[in-house]
Amino acid sequence: MRGKRVGFSLTEIGEMLDLYDRNDNQVGQLTTTLDQCRHKISLLTRQQRDLEATVAELTEYCQTITDLLKERNVKIARG
């Protein structure tokens, strides 16, 4: 359930679980899971930066529109 909660697909979770039964003291499962976690962190970090940039751009755009409407003496609702 933890894997699903942090965004791993069922296929990825299955691949990690398939390594559980190997006789390598779970080293294969643990290293694979570590690699997948690091990859997921990298992906999420990039997405977070993209989202922050998008929010900043939209916020700036909203301010520009608000300023233009104020110049035209249009009352705008806050939201």
Image (cartoon, grey):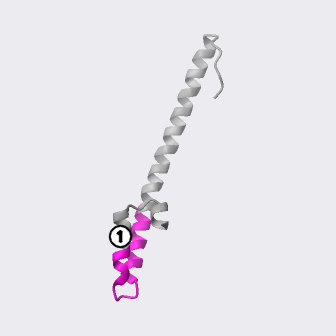
Q: Could you tell me which secondary element the residue under label 1 belongs to?
A: helix
Q: Is residue 50 above or below residue 42?
A: above
Specify whether 2 is left or right of 17: right
| Percent x, y of residue 18 | 33, 76
- Asked if residue 41 lies in the magenta stretch, the reply is no
Residue 26 lies within the magenta run: yes
Looking at the image, residue 66 lies above or below residue 23: above
> What's the residue type where badge 1 is placed?
Gly
Occupied quadrant, residue 36: bottom left
Up/down of 41 relative to 32, above or below? above
- Going by the picture, which residue comes out furthest to the top? 72
Q: Residue at x 45, y 50 (%)?
A: 47
Residue at image location 49% in from the left, 44% down from the top: 51
| Residue at the disc numbered 1 | 14
Residue 17: image location, x then y, percent = 38, 75
For image coordinates 35% across by 83% down, the residue present is 21
**Labels in figure, total:** 1
> How many residues crowd mark 1 within 10 Å: few (<14), some (14–19), many (20+)?
few
Q: Position of residue 71 (x, y in %)?
A: 62, 13
Q: Tell me which secondary structure the magenta stretch mostly adopts.
A: helix
Q: Quadrant of residue 30?
A: bottom left
Q: Quadrant of the C terminus?
A: top right
Task: Tell me the magenta residue range.
Answer: 17-39
Query: Which of 16 and 53 lies nearest the eye of the viewer?
Result: 16
Coordinates of residue 40 in the picture (x, y in percent): 43, 61
